[in-house]
Amino acid sequence: MKHIVKILSLLLAVSAFWIGLLQAAIIPPGYNTWLLPIYFVVSLGCYGLLMVGLGLMQFPTCPQEALLLQHDIAEAKDFFKHKGVDVGSD
Amino acid sequence: MAEEKKYKYSIIVPTYNERLNIALIVYLIFKHLRDVDFEIIVVDDGSPDGTQEIVKQLQHLYGEDRILLRARAKKLGLGTAYIHGLKHATGDFVVIMDADLSHHPKYLPSFIKKQLETNASIVTGTRYVKGGGVHGWNLMRKLTSRGANVLAQTLLWPGVSDLTGSFRLYKKSVLEDVISSCVSKGYVFQMEMIVRATRKGYHIEEVPITFVDRVFGTSKLGGSEIVEYLKGLVYLLLTT
């Protein structure tokens, strides 16, 4: 099944649930019809922002890797110099 | 004790103007894969800086059976470079990696080990988990990356933490299968590969890798890249 179909089915199921609740008058009259959809979109937005924020705070960095890379480059250049391979410069 | 089956690994490296980097990469691959049966397939798109001459010297040094030069006349794109390299690959597994040293060959043993341990069809490198990381990105770049990732995770449920990464190990037959159904270009192509692989039910494992971006300083992540990315996401959302 295509992914978009899965997502649409999920949304459809949730909407059907909400409409069902409205129709069966389980939700007291006076509640905005659009309550669940609005909450859904807003919480999705908040969740997204939270994930971005958390991810940004925990973003793994590796400054030491740049240094290690410089060592590796020097080692490799040295090797090639001795083997007579002219690698030129960066 | 049963004889351990020895596998061969084909490492495909597409290059364009990587005269120095290709030599460094070859040196590092040989350094880190001492007891492994592998071949390096350099797919060069007619580099004007002499990349192919360097590769020929490397072939002289390491052997033409270890380094294959399969060049093309001009810049024809990454996807087709992989397909071209695949045609000449004789390994059981295929590794794809970038030529600019943002992908360090020292992680190759961990890819191989992970695959042998889990019998995964694909092992993909991820920069975004503990043990991995990125160097060379400013805050804005990290923000865009993180935002893009969250959006992709929410929409696509891709099953991997790093969608746009291009440091991966595939079972040869799996790569052939997945690549035949991908049509995108650039980094959306990398996303499409991993998403299609997930949809097809292939077993995918991740290993942490570090990514040193030496290019970012010179290229900007502009509005057009963002638009391309969003278009790619929508395309993947609708067609996978």
Image: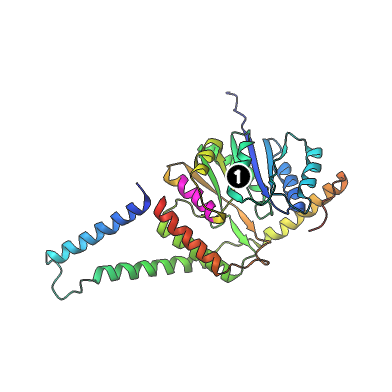
Q: Residue at x 33, y 55 (%)?
A: A7
**Residue B128, percent from left and from top:** 54, 58
**Residue B75, percent from left and from top:** 66, 52
Q: Which residue is mark 1?
A: B82
Tell me the element at label 1. helix
Q: Amino acid at mark 1?
A: Tyr
Residue sitting nearer the eye, A86 or B234: B234
Question: Circle 1 marks a residue in which chain?
Answer: B
Q: Is residue B40 found inside the magenta-colored segment of the image?
A: no
Magenta region: which residues? B188-197
Residue A88 is at least partly visible in this image? yes
Q: Residue at x 49, y 48 (%)?
A: B194
Q: Residue at x 61, y 43 (%)?
A: B95
Q: Count neighbours of disc 1 (C-alpha within 10 A) and say few if under 14, some if 14 to 19, many if 20 or more.
A: many
Q: Is residue B189 found inside the magenta-colored segment of the image?
A: yes
Residue A11: image quadrant is bottom left
Residue A55 is at least partly visible in this image? no
Residue B231 located left or right of residue A23: right
Residue B24 located left or right of residue B5: right
